[in-house]
Image: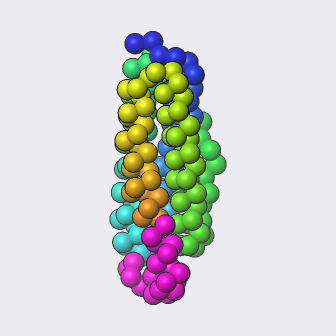
Amino acid sequence: MQGKQSIIDALNLLLANELTAMDQYFIHSRMYLDWGLQKLYERIDHEVTDEKAHASAIIERILFLEGTPNMVTRDPIQVGHDVPTMLQNDLNVEYHVGALLKKTMALCEAEQDYVTRSMLQTLLDDTENDHAHWLEQQLRHIKLLGLPNYLQSQL
C-alpha cells in the first residue's frame, strides 16, 4: 500500500530515535553489568529488547507503506559515567521519543492514517507508562534513599 511520504519520513525519524535509544540502553546495560549492578543490568537489558521491538514495528510499517527504512541515521547517544547521569540520560531519550511519537500521531490523524496512529499509540503507552515511569522512579529512589543505599539495592 503506497503511504504518504510525510508519514514515511516521520516514521524514519522515529526509527532513528528508537535505534538511538536502543544503542544508549545497550551501552548502559553493559556498564551496569561491568559494575556488578545486576538488577539495573537486567532491567536496562530488557529495555534494549523493547526498543528493538519498537524499531521492528516501525520498520514493518514503513515497508508496508512502500517506504525504505533508514537504518543508518542515529542521534548521538549520551553515555553517562555514573548511575544517576545514565538514568537521567535514558529518561531524556524517552521524553524525546515520546514527544516525537505524539507529533507523528498528530500527523497520522491529519492524514487519516489511523492504522499507523494506532501502532504508534501502543509504542507511546510503552514509552510513557513503562520506560519513562520506571526511570523517574529510579531517580526518585536515589533522592529518597541516597545513592549508596540505592546502589546497594541494585547489586
> In the shown orientation, is residue 9 left or right of residue 125?
right
Magenta region's main secondary structure?
helix
Name the outermost residue toward the top.
2
Q: Residue at x 53, y 33 (%)?
A: 106
Q: Is residue 5 above or below residue 35?
A: above
Q: Quadrant of residue 60?
A: top left
Residue nearest the observer in this picture, 16 or 9 = 9
Q: Is residue 144 above or below residue 140?
A: below
Q: Residue 27 location, x and y as percent?
A: 51, 58
> Coloring scheme of the render?
rainbow
Q: Residue 68 location, x and y as percent?
A: 50, 21
Q: Is residue 71 visible?
A: no
Q: Quadrant of residue 114?
A: top left
Q: Quadrant of the N terminus?
A: top left
Part of the protein shown in magenta: 136-155
> Per the image, is 152 magenta?
yes
Q: Quadrant of the C terminus?
A: bottom left
Q: Residue 147 location, x and y as percent?
A: 52, 83
Q: Residue at x 39, y 57 (%)?
A: 130
Q: Is residue 60 visible?
A: yes
